[in-house]
Amino acid sequence: MDTLVDKPTAVAQTVQAEASRSLVDEKIVLAEVTTVELKPTASNYPAESIGENGFPCTARSEECGGVTLLVDEGVATQIEPSTANATLEERLLTEDGVVLVGETREVIEPHTSRERKSVSSTSGTEDEDAESTTPLTSTTPSEYEGCETSTDVFTEMVPAATTVSELYAENIIAKALRTAHTAIGALPFAFPEIVPQDVGADGAYSLREADFWTCGFFPGTLYLLLERLIRYPQSVQLRDTAIRRQDLRSQLTALCRAWSEPIRGMDTRTDTHDIGFIIMPALRLDWELFGNTQSLDSIVRAAHSLATRYVPSARAIRSWDLLKKKDIEILDQTENMIVIIDSMCNLDLLYYASHHAQEPHLAEMATLHALTLLRSHLRPEPVLSASKEAYSGQWYSTCHVANIDPRTGELKRRLSAQGYAHESTWSRGQAWGILGYAETYVWTKDSRFLEASCGLAEYFLHRLDTAPSCVGSRGRYVPLWDFDAPIEDENNPLRDSSAGVIAANGMLILSQALSSSNQSALASRYRNAALKIVRDTLEFALAPEKAKLISAPYLHVRAEERLPGVRFDGLLKFGTANNNSQARKRYANHGLVYGDYYLVEFGNRLLRMGLH
């Protein structure tokens, strides 16, 4: 579509003062720690090495001149008497230059990134092979609606002030800026996907071919950071006083445009249902921040491309054209239609384009698809909580893949391509469901979708809270990669940090939707659950290898490691792309570009809600 009709719509942007006050005013006082580095080092503190006092078992406490020093791996940390007995959570510091006691550290050494073969994202092998409107009215319904606060889902209030500090640290923007500069030469052929955690890895993002479904997330992350500089400049923390925010903004704007241009060229792809993941993260913000009609045109064209995959007789959008695994092949499209739970998060593209281009049929397709997945992908579960605060309606787990008869829409079989087993609950799939149905409710106001998202969220929280004892208290709310998979290593249970932050975004949207429908207690429950998940994720999975911004000549800003040679370009560790035993390629325990994207997006959602 070449021309769009400009029809501004009124969007409520009121934020209740109570919302920002209740979560921000509560603070946890952190320990006052002075650090003296005796020699540069990168310590390795696996979870099992943390003692009951919260310090590494290898560390020793010494008295020197009337003060207590924690000495470990050549680093002496002075602990003030008032906080010497503080908990690990209270001692974790986020200020620049402070050694983070108790966080996992890895020694990163150079290696050569692995190359991967090109795979169409319409195939079930996508994670398996070797490797008329104005910008100001572009927010989705309820995006800025107010929120009220109540008690936490896990029996305690979660103050946003203690949750969000690392979300806005200089480290976040520094890592993205460095990757944007170092990997730009690969455009338009490759985009960041994972950061290997293997010993000997160089800490840089490994790149994936441009037609892979994850290509839109890194450009989207850059735009999220640009949104902060434009709309919320006070949230951007800079230590180097010589850096001017306007210079950083100009530099980041240029990088955003360079990284988004290849994305715009993908809007006519009809070979993938993931066009929403590809297009929306960057181009939506390019339209909303700058009024770039080229980006809005691309969004509408991409929605038309996705609509070509809609099968009216099945009332659903085909996700993959085929499924090829070691144990199963589904190749015939006349008798089979593969639909995955992830597809719920691509519907936002259809609703957004429908709203802006005034094309109702796009929204109708999305709604019918969401209704079909209520039957094909959601599995009813018993209500397992006695809490009066929990959602009392139907709970649901999810399957990853459903094979539907394209002629009748009948469910033929439920499968998993990335989870542990066909009957198990893959944690990231559950998270996609929470987020997708929450977004769908915001657009439609159909209570069936709100109830589905609540039921999915409750089951997700229940599985976090009842995780096996080997998960321990630290990182308890960083999900296992599959809630039903056997634990192969009880000392290091395999997790997926991306699943947690995706679910947390969905719960924040849920909290806004429930608040708008005068269900303040349940709204508070999901908001506090989201904050707790993200706080736990930051404590457990945030990479301790930090980066910093440095002013350079000619108003340039560059990024480098805080400690020379200690690098990890991802924000979060412990992501799991695909650990299915029958996958052609299993890879886990790494940084994931979409984990980083949804972490930064969570921080921006808090800003939009007025909670920071």
Image (tube, helix red, strand yellow):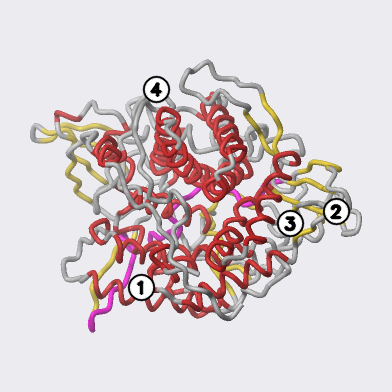
Residue matched to label 4 = 155
Q: Is residue 89 left or right of residue 510?
A: left
Is residue 555 part of the magenta span, yes or no? yes
- The amino acid sitting under disc 3 is Ile
Q: Which mark is residue 406?
A: 2
Indicate yes or no whether the magenta region holds residue 594: no
Marked residue nearer the N-terminal end (4 or 1): 4
Identify the amino acid type marked 4. Thr
Residue 611 percent across, percent down from the top left = 31, 45
Choose the circle earlier in sequence order: 4 or 2: 4
Badge 4 or badge 3: first in the primary sequence: 4
SS under mark 1: helix
Between disc 1 and disc 2, whose residue precedes? 1
128 or 250, nearer to the observer: 250
Chain part drawn in magenta: 553-580
How far from the left and from the top, in percent, is residue 357? 56, 68
Is 102 above or below relative to 117? above
Q: Across the whole image, how many numbered discs are drawn on residues?
A: 4
Residue at the disc numbered 3: 317
Say which residue label 1 marks. 252
Q: Is residue 179 visible?
A: no
